[in-house]
C-alpha cells in the first residue's frame, strides 16, 4: 500500500490511525500542501480532485479519507473500527461525520486560502472563523462522548469516531482554540492518544514533518 498524504493534514492523520490500527504496512509519499504539490499534473493524474490522502492498493487508487477508512474496515475486519450493532454503528458514524462534514471542510487549507486571498479576510477574522466551527462541532461531540464514551470516544475500543476526532483536536490545539469547555472530550482523547497505533500516526512522528 502507498499512502499519499501530508504530515499535518488531518485527513491523512485519520487515515494513518486506521492503517496502524489494522496493523497494515504502508509506504508514505508526501505532497506538501503549502507549496501546492497536490496540484501537480502527476498527482492530479492519480487523484483528479487534487486532495490528500489517496491510497494506492491492488491497482486501485482510493480517495476521501472516510471512504478509505470504511474500506479498510471492510477489507481487513480485525480489529473492527465499527460496532456490530446497527444503532451503535450509526452513532459512531455520526460522531465521525461531525468532524468530516461539519468542522474540517470549513477549516481546511483551500478554504482558508480563499478567505485570505480572494475575500481579503484578516488574520483575526480567520482565527475567529476557525474557532467558531470547531467550537460548534466540539459542543456536540462533548455531549456525545459524555453519553456514549468509555475508554474511547465510543465505548471501550477504538472506532472510526476516534480516527476522526483525534486529528481534529490536534488541529484545534494548533489554531489555539480555547478547549476548556470540553473536559470529557479532552480527557478521552488524551487516553486515545496513548494507544501505540494512534501515537505512531501523530504528525510530529512522520518523516516529512517540518
Image (tube, rainbow, N blue to C red):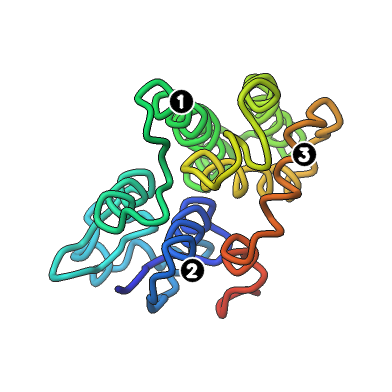
Residue displayed at 32% across by 53% down: 77
- Determine whether 42 is above or below 13 in the image: below
Residue under numbered circle 3: 186
Percent x, y for residue 196? 63, 66
Residue sitting farthest toward the right: 180
- Determine whether 27 is above or below 84 in the image: below
Quarter residue 61 falls in? bottom left
Residue 69 appears left or right of 139: left
Give the Cα separation between the discs numbered 3 and 2.
Answer: 29 Å
Q: In the rendered image, which quarter contains the C terminus? A: bottom right
Residue 40 appears left or right of 159: left
Residue displayed at 40% across by 49% down: 80
Residue under numbered circle 1: 94
Question: CB atoms at circles 1 and 3 under 8 Å apart?
Answer: no
Question: CB atoms at circles 3 and 2 under 8 Å apart?
Answer: no
Residue 178 appears left or right of 68: right
Percent x, y for residue 201? 57, 65
- Pick the residue in front: 142 or 159: 159
Residue under numbered circle 2: 32
The earlier-in-sequence mark between 1 and 3 is: 1
Q: Secondary structure at mark 3?
A: helix
Residue sitting farthest toward the left: 59
Q: Secondary structure at mark 1?
A: helix
Q: Secondary structure at mark 2?
A: loop
Between tags 2 and 1, which lies in front? 1
The earlier-in-sequence mark between 3 and 2 is: 2
Q: Residues within 10 Å of mark 2 (few under 14, many from 20)?
A: some
Q: Residues within 10 Å of mark 3 (few under 14, many from 20)?
A: some
Residue displayed at 46% across by 36% down: 100
Amino acid at each position: 500500500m502507498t499512502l499519499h498524504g501530508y504530515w499535518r493534514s488531518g485527513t491523512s492523520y485519520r487515515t494513518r490511525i486506521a492503517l496502524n490500527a489494522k496493523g497494515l504496512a504502508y509506504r508514505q509519499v508526501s505532497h506538501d500542501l503549502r507549496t501546492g504539490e497536490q496540484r501537480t499534473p502527476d498527482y492530479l493524474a492519480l487523484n483528479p480532485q487534487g486532495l490528500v490522502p489517496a491510497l494506492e492498493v491492488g491497482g486501485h487508487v482510493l480517495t476521501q479519507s472516510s471512504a478509505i477508512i470504511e474500506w479498510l474496515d471492510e477489507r481487513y475486519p480485525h480489529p473492527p473500527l465499527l460496532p456490530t450493532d446497527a444503532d451503535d454503528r450509526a452513532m459512531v458514524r455520526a460522531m465521525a461525520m461531525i468532524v468530516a462534514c461539519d468542522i474540517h471542510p470549513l477549516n481546511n487549507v483551500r478554504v482558508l486560502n480563499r478567505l485570505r486571498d480572494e475575500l481579503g479576510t484578516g488574520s483575526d477574522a480567520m482565527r475567529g472563523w476557525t474557532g467558531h466551527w470547531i467550537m460548534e462541532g466540539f459542543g456536540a461531540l462533548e455531549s456525545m462522548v459524555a453519553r456514549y464514551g468509555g475508554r474511547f470516544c465510543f465505548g471501550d475500543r477504538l472506532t472510526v469516531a476516534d480516527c476522526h476526532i483525534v486529528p481534529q483536536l490536534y488541529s484545534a490545539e494548533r489554531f489555539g482554540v480555547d478547549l476548556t469547555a470540553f473536559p470529557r472530550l479532552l480527557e478521552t482523547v488524551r487516553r486515545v492518544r496513548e494507544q501505540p497505533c494512534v501515537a505512531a500516526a501523530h504528525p510530529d512522528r512522520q518523516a516529512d514533518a517540518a
